[in-house]
C-alpha cells in the first residue's frame, strides 16, 4: 500500500466484468484471481475484499435471490394460493435479473461450459426449492403440496430463464416466466 | 486363485448388502472396497467384476432406470398426451423400485448423510429430466412444453419416492406416484 488509499469506483463491477471476459476467453478453470485483478486494473487484495474466490463471482448473487424469493412467498397475502405465492416469487426474481441481462447471459455461457459449475448451479437450484417449500410450510401448506409447488416454481424459473438468456432480443424476463407458468398449467392439465 | 474357482451365488447382491450395511454403520466416506468384500465373504477382485468403485453400488442402477423411463415415453401410444406419457414412465419406474424397497430405503439414508452423494443424485435427476425432455421432443412436443413436462415428471418422481421411502409401512410406490401427480395437477391449477 502506498501513502494514499485510492477509492476505486465500482471495483466490484469491474472485477465481475473482467472475470466474465476471462472465463469466456480461456475458460473458468484456466483463469486465476491474479489475472482477473490485473484485467480490472485492481489488486488481488481488492478482489478478495469483494469475493471469497473466483467461483463466488458467478454465485455470489444466489443468496440474495433466494432471500428475495422466500420473502415474496412469506409476504404474499394470506388468501393467495400456494402456486400464486411461488409465482410472485419467481416474477420478483425475474424483475431483478432483468436488470442484469448482459451479466446473466455471459454467466450462463461460462456455467454451461464447465461440469463443476453446472453441478454447483444444480445444488443452488435444489437449495432454492427447499427454501421455497419451507416458506410454503410456514404458510400452512402441507406435504407433498409444498414440495411439489416449490419444485414446479423452480422448474418454471429455470426453463424461462434459459429461454430468455438464449433469446436473440432482450425481451422481458417476467413475461417469459408467466408464459412458462401458463405452459406448465396447460401440460399438467393434459392438454 | 486356488485350483478350483468357486461359483458364488448372488455375489452382486451380497456385495450390495455388505456395502449398504457398512455405509450405514461407519459412513460412505469411511468404508473401503476391501472392507465391503470382506464383509460379503468375497474378494476385492469379485467386487470389481461387479462395480467400478464403491459409489457404483449406489448409482449403478440409474442408467437402467433412465433407459426404462425413456423407453416408456417413446413407446406410449401416439394419442397419449405428453404429461401422461411421462406419468407412464414414472409409474414404470415405481413398479421396478417397488421390488427393491429395502435397498431403496437403506440407499436413501446413505445418500442423505453425504454431501457428495447428494450432489451425485441431483446430477442423475437432472440428466434424467434432460433425457425425458429429449424423448418428448422425439414425439413432436415443442419447447418449453417438453422441458416443463419432463421437470414436472421428475419432481413427482422425487417427491413420491421420498415419501414412500419414509413411510412406516411398505405401501405401493406407483400409487404414491399417482397421488403425487394428482397433487401437482391440483396445485398448478391454483386450488
Image (cartoon, coloured by chain):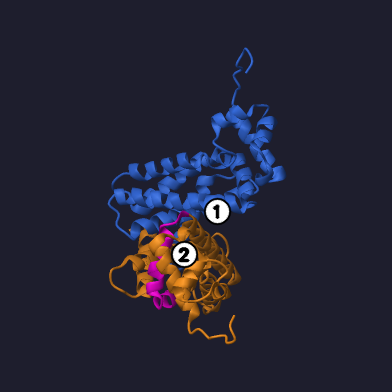
Chain colours: A orange, B blue
Residue A173: image tag? none
Q: Which segment did they paint magenta?
A: A92-115
Asked whether residue A96 is drawn in magenta, I would say yes
Image x and y of residue B50, in percent: 55, 31
Whether labels 2 and 1 belong to a single chain: the reply is no
Residue extending farthest top: B3
Tell me the chain of label 1: B
Q: Depth check: A182 or B176 in front?
A: A182
Asked whether residue A6 is drawn in magenta, I would say no
Q: Secondary structure at mark 1?
A: helix
Tell me the chain of label 2: A
Image x and y of residue B74, in percent: 34, 44
Left or right: residue B76 compared with residue A117: left
Q: Depth check: B106 or B46 in front?
A: B46
What residue lies at 42% left-to-right and 52% top-to-bottom? Answer: B129
Q: How many marks?
A: 2
Q: Residues within 10 Å of mark 1 (few under 14, many from 20)?
A: some
Quarter residue B190 falls in = bottom left
**Which of pointers 2 and 1 indicates the residue nearer the eye?**
1
Residue B119: image tag? 1
Q: Depth check: B34 or A18 in front?
A: A18
Q: Does the residue at mark 2 contact the one at mark 1 (Cβ under 8 Å)?
A: no
Residue A107 at least partly seen: no
Instruction: From the image, tell me which residue sits under label 2.
Output: A154
Image x and y of residue B112, in percent: 62, 52
Residue extending farthest right: B25
Left or right: residue B168 compared with residue A152: right
Amino acid at each position: 500500500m502506498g501513502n494514499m488509499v485510492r477509492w476505486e469506483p465500482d471495483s466490484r463491477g469491474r472485477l465481475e466484468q473482467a472475470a466474465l471476459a476471462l472465463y469466456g476467453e480461456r475458460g473458468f478453470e484456466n483463469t486465476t484471481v491474479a489475472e482477473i485483478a490485473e484485467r480490472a486494473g485492481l489488486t488481488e487484495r481488492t478482489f478478495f475484499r469483494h469475493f471469497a474466490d473466483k467461483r463466488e463471482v458467478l454465485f455470489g448473487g444466489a443468496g440474495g435471490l433466494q432471500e428475495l424469493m422466500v420473502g415474496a412467498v412469506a409476504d404474499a397475502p394470506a388468501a393467495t394460493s400456494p402456486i400464486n405465492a411461488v409465482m410472485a416469487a419467481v416474477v420478483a426474481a425475474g424483475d431483478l435479473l432483468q436488470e442484469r441481462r448482459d451479466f446473466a447471459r455471459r454467466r450462463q455461457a461460462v456455467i454451461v461450459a464447465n461440469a463443476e459449475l453446472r453441478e454447483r448451479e444444480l445444488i443452488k437450484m435444489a437449495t432454492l426449492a427447499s427454501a421455497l417449500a419451507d416458506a410454503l410450510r410456514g404458510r400452512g401448506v402441507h406435504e407433498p403440496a409444498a414440495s411439489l409447488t416449490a419444485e414446479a416454481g423452480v422448474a418454471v424459473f429455470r426453463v424461462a430463464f434459459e429461454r430468455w438468456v438464449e433469446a436473440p432480443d432482450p425481451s422481458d424476463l417476467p413475461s417469459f416466466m408467466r408464459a412458462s407458468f401458463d405452459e406448465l398449467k396447460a401440460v399438467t392439465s393434459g392438454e
